Image (cartoon, rainbow, N blue to C red):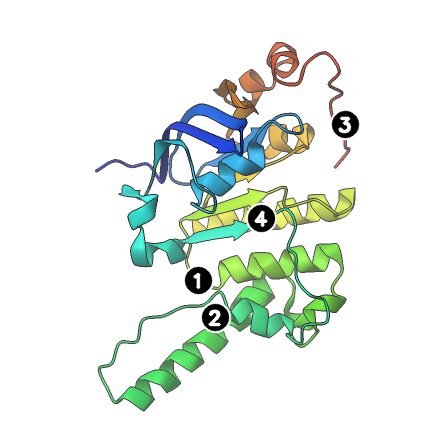
């Protein structure tokens, strides 16, 4: 047994005939916040989808909580995922509270009668959903149809979805895409607060170098393969960014 939340070794992924990710290896320790940065087409989203077993890999091994990802079983609910684009039919009749409730699962402990157990689970679920919405400042949206939410509101609701059950690993793929600068800063502050309270380990894809430098513990610079890795002050040096992005790279200078 190790103390790693995630261990990736020799991961290679093809998309058709295109080599998207080549021989990537890294580990995540509990409670850390690791960012994956790199140019468009570098394989960042492909990497996180492969880590979550959402797309097939050509080579390599992935272990989460010391188990191969394909044999994670009931521990899969300890993973939270926020995709870059949450695609859905905006006319679909589901409200915020119902969506967040879909993130709650519980194996019934049938110490009493079957119906008593179901009632208890419904009550636990209701309490968990309410608490998650309150903690993400989204409680006032609970009865609103998800198709009417703004980009920033939807991000908070998806974070509540991840919060409604205890998670060990939270994976964010460009979680701030479609959110303005102030909205991204507010969301990051909320994420950091919840990360400390919940003890989450975070793996995130980001284009915002300034935000990564301010908030993350570790950085993976990726361009198909890992160019460099380390603490932000090392990985995000001008030399490493040049090696990762090439001479045409212009750093984000958001003022948060």
Marks 1 and 3, how far apart at CA: 35 Å
116 lies left or right of 87 = left
Residue 196: x %, y % from top left: 48, 47
- At a point 66% along the width and 18% down the height, the residue shown is 245
Residue 79: x %, y % from top left: 43, 51
Task: Compare residues 56 and 218 and report the one nearer the observer.
Answer: 56
Marks 2 and 1, how far apart at CA: 8 Å
Q: Quadrant of the N terminus?
A: top left
Return the residue at label 2: 128
Q: How crowded is mark 4: few (under 14 residues within 10 Å), some or many (20 or more)?
A: some
Marks 3 and 2, how far apart at CA: 38 Å
Mark found first going from the N terminus, 2 or 1: 2
Return the residue at label 4: 191
Task: Compare residues 64 and 42 and report the one nearer the observer.
Answer: 42
63 lies left or right of 104 = left
- At a point 45% along the width and 75% down the height, the residue shown is 125
**Up-down relation of residue 42 to residue 56 (above or below):** above
Mark 4 or 1, closer to the camera: 1
Residue 199: x %, y % from top left: 43, 47
Residue 237 sits in quarter = top right
Cβ–Cβ under 8 Å for marks 2 and 1 = yes
SS at circle 2: helix
Return the residue at label 1: 165
Mark found first going from the N terminus, 3 or 4: 4
Return the residue at label 3: 253
235 lies left or right of 95 = left
């Amino acid at each position: 047994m190790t103390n790693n939340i995630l261990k990736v070794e020799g991961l290679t992924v093809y998309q058709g005939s295109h080599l998207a990710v080549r021989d990537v290896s890294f580990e995540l320790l509990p409670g850390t916040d690791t960012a994956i940065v790199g140019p468009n087409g570098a394989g960042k989203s492909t990497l996180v989808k492969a880590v979550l077993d959402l797309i097939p890999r050509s080579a390599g091994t992935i272990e989460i909580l010391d188990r191969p990802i394909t044999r994670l079983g009931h521990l899969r609910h300890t993973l939270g995922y926020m995709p870059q684009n949450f695609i859905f039919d905006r006319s679909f009749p589901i409200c915020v509270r119902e969506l967040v409730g879909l993130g709650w699962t519980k194996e019934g402990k049938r110490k009493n009668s079957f119906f008593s157990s179901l009632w208890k689970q419904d009550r636990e679920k209701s309490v968990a959903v309410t608490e998650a919405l309150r903690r993400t400042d989204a409680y006032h949206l609970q009865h609103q149809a998800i198709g009417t939410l703004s980009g920033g509101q939807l991000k908070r609701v998806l974070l509540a979805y991840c919060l409604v059950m205890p998670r060990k690993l939270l994976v964010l793929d460009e979680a701030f895409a479609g959110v303005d600068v102030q909205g991204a800063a507010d969301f990051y502050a909320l994420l950091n607060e919840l990360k400390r309270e919940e003890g989450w380990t975070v793996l995130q894809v980001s284009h915002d170098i300034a935000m990564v430098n301010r908030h993350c513990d570790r950085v993976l610079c990726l361009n198909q393969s890992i160019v460099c890795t380390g603490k932000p002050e090392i990985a995000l040096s001008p030399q490493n960014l040049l090696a990762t992005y090439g001479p045409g790279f212009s750093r984000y200078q958001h003022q948060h």
